[in-house]
Image: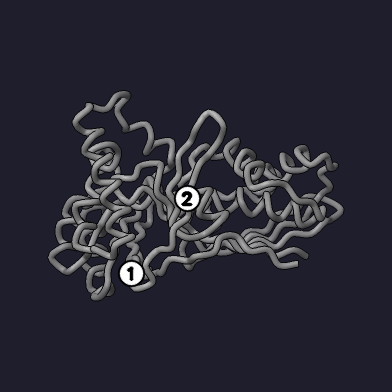
Amino acid sequence: MIKIEVPATTTNFGSGFDTFGLSLHLSNIFFVEFSEEFTVEVSGYKSGIPENENNLFIKVYKRVCEKIGEVPKPIKLLQENNIPPARGLGSSATAIVGAIEGTLALFNKRISLEDKIEIAFEFEPHPDNIIPALVGGFTVCATSETGVLFKKLDFPEELKLVFVIPDYKVPTSEARRVLPGAIKLKDTIFNVQRSALFVSALLTRDYELLREAVKDKIHQIYREELVPGLGKAIEESYKKGALATFLSGAGPTICSIVLENGEDIGERIKEIVENASGHSAQVKILKAMNTGVKVFS
């Protein structure tokens, strides 16, 4: 049986929409082996995850088989979901990346990283989740006519990430729907300036710049209607000492970058989110992970 561990990811960091991604010390785990028929068993977060051939892992498995010229033999999949789905933590990317690596391990085949990304993009055409799940670390991504360009950077070890995860989903399709069809030039410039500032702040360890660097006028500002309490949560987090606070991925999870006081910051955001939305929430304090997907056979 093949075991695959794929890390959660947080993306965007406010100003870096569809550009920045970071792998985290929280993983979904997949166990897969050949079988007489396709079977899927999901544990952990399982609501809405198909336990049949409509499972995303199975769909990607069949596509990879086609890519490498193999017959998609039936497999048994055990899927341990530790990452809540549709919360802005890259859950679907773990299934895609896990299936690619698991399939290659089952058939003892290799393909290039470029081919892996190409397959992954057929199922999720956004690099900010896929790339850090594959390679780990903090990644800066760009799409081009010839494929995806990216650079992996080490995320400062002293920084912790406080996640407040509400108990409701925001599907990516809904989070995309609320975005405007066109962006004003001044708003585009605003984000370009701050995304560049964000990378500079990380590289120079000038953390006082992060609060300004995660400000956004392209996506997060429009998604506030889907995440009750977001604006107040950001404001209150800074009073508690957060370095930066932003929407994780498409939301509804809220993330704060901190050096200290993470528990207090998380509990304050949790209180605001629960009062505003009427839904419970949980707090997770995680660190960045410099490695991506791992395969054990």
The label on residue 254 is none
Name the quadrant of the N terminus: bottom right
| Crowding at mark 2 (Cα within 10 Å: few <14, some 14-19, many 20+) | few
Tell me residue 51's x, y (percent). 66, 51
Residue tagged 2: 151
Query: Is residue 243 among the parts visible in the rendering?
Result: yes
Residue tagged 1: 159
Give the residue drawn at x 48%, y 66%: 289
Q: Earlier in the sequence, mark 2 or mark 1?
A: 2
Give the residue drawn at x 22%, y 47%: 215
Looking at numbered disc 1 in the image, what kind of residue is underneath it? Answer: Leu
Closest to the observer: 46 or 62? 62
Tell me residue 17's x, y (percent). 35, 42
Name the quadrant of the C terminus: bottom right
> For residue 135, what is the image quadrant?
bottom right
| Crowding at mark 1 (Cα within 10 Å: few <14, some 14-19, many 20+) | some
Tell me residue 285's x, y (percent). 36, 70
Is disc 1 placed on a helix, strand or loop?
Answer: loop
Give the CA separation, mark 2 to mark 1: 20 Å
